[in-house]
Image (cartoon, rainbow, N blue to C red):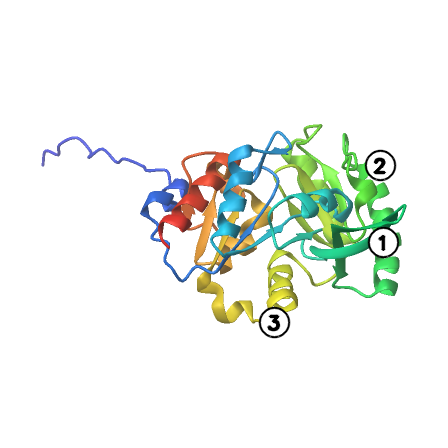
């Protein structure tokens, strides 16, 4: 019996990027009530918010939407932006601390003339009690020192002085750690009983049950007295890294700015949509899509 040549078998390599729908296919509706957004490499480019992203925040607020930035950055780092940016709040340190702006009237007297000087003041709220924060802080400093000793090249993030409820190791902001060093640092944190996540620039670790999703639920209760889970389909989340994947998982309207592609191989949960532009330009695309749907 004569047989012909064996059939050619083509092996296709799965590309998870194929599971991301372009933002242009998203149909934002008038039911969108608010937006949560990451900060680093979502609103910012090279560490600073871009003008188009800042304008997008202002446009969303002007249209009556609730806008909350939720970040792994420290509360000290976040304070000036909570005062300056057009947002309802910044939830910092991965859901642990909320900063919100409140108007206060200070009475100043110059000679015989009284001047009412309206100023913005910050209100700061915590999810953990003071004694818990103090105990956790001491233990976290020990873990931080251990990582710097045991992981070659590992250094605490330059914004560490402003951190109250977590620690952070720099992997891509001012230094570069290889993946094996990142994995080693995460392992040390988790072995110590900490939560650990990796953002686009830092490895963050903390003790407690909070995270970005719990922080989002908390701030919606605190600010508006509502249950986020009951209206999740009315909120949008925008992010760029593995530190956002819990939000990608739970928000039907989840969007990754284009630079999320760097982290797709490490993501167990992908955003539903992806922008064409990276970082602040991508965020501005999301805001435009929301506003066009109203």
Q: Secondary structure at mark 2?
A: helix
Q: Is residue 262 visible?
A: no
Disc 3 versus disc 2: nearer the observer? 3
Name the residue at 22% across, 33% down.
Answer: 8
Vertically, is 152 above or below 141? above
**Element assignment for label 1:** helix
Q: Which residue is mark 2?
A: 149
Residue at 50 percent of width and 56 percent of height: 65
Q: Earlier in the sequence, mark 3 or mark 2?
A: 2
Q: For numbered disc 3, what is the local secondary structure?
A: loop
How far is mark 2 from mark 1, CA to CA?
19 Å
Q: Which residue is mark 3?
A: 225
Residue 137: numbered disc: 1
Residue contact between numbered discs 2 and 1, judged by CB atoms under 8 Å: no
Q: Position of residue 12 (x, y in %)?
A: 32, 38
Residue placed furthest toward the left: 1
Closest to the camera, between mark 3 and mark 1, is 3
What numbered label is drawn on residue 226?
Answer: none
**Residue 108 visible in image:** yes
The residue under the point 89% across, 53% down is: 138
176 vs 73, nearest the viewer: 73
């Amino acid at each position: 019996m004569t047989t012909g040549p064996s059939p050619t078998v083509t092996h296709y390599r799965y590309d998870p990027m194929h599971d991301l729908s372009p933002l242009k296919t998203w149909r934002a509706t008038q039911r969108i009530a608010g937006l949560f957004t990451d900060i680093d490499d979502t609103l910012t480019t090279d560490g600073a918010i871009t003008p188009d992203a800042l304008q997008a925040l202002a446009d969303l607020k002007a249209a009556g939407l609730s806008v909350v930035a939720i970040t792994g950055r420290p509360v000290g780092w976040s304070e000036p932006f909570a005062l300056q940016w057009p947002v309802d709040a910044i939830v910092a340190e991965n859901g642990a601390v909320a900063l919100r702006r409140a108007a206060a009237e200070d009475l100043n007297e110059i000679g015989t003339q009284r001047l009412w000087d309206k100023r913005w003041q910050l209100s700061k709220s915590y999810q953990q009690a003071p004694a818990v924060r103090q105990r956790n802080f001491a233990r976290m400093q020990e873990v931080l020192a251990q990582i710097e000793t045991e992981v070659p090249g590992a250094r605490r993030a330059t914004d560490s002085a402003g951190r109250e409820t977590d620690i952070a190791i720099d992997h891509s902001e001012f230094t570069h750690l290889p993946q094996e060093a990142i994995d080693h640092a995460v392992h040390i944190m988790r072995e110590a009983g900490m939560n650990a996540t990796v953002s686009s620039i830092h490895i963050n670790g903390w003790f407690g049950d909070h995270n970005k999703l719990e922080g989002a639920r908390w701030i919606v209760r605190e600010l508006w007295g509502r249950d986020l889970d009951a209206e999740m389909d009315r909120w949008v989340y925008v992010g760029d890294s593995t530190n956002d994947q819990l939000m990608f998982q739970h928000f039907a309207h989840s969007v990754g700015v284009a630079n999320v592609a760097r982290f797709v191989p490490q993501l167990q949960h992908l955003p539903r949509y992806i922008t064409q532009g990276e970082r602040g330009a991508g965020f501005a695309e999301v805001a435009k899509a929301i506003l066009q749907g109203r």
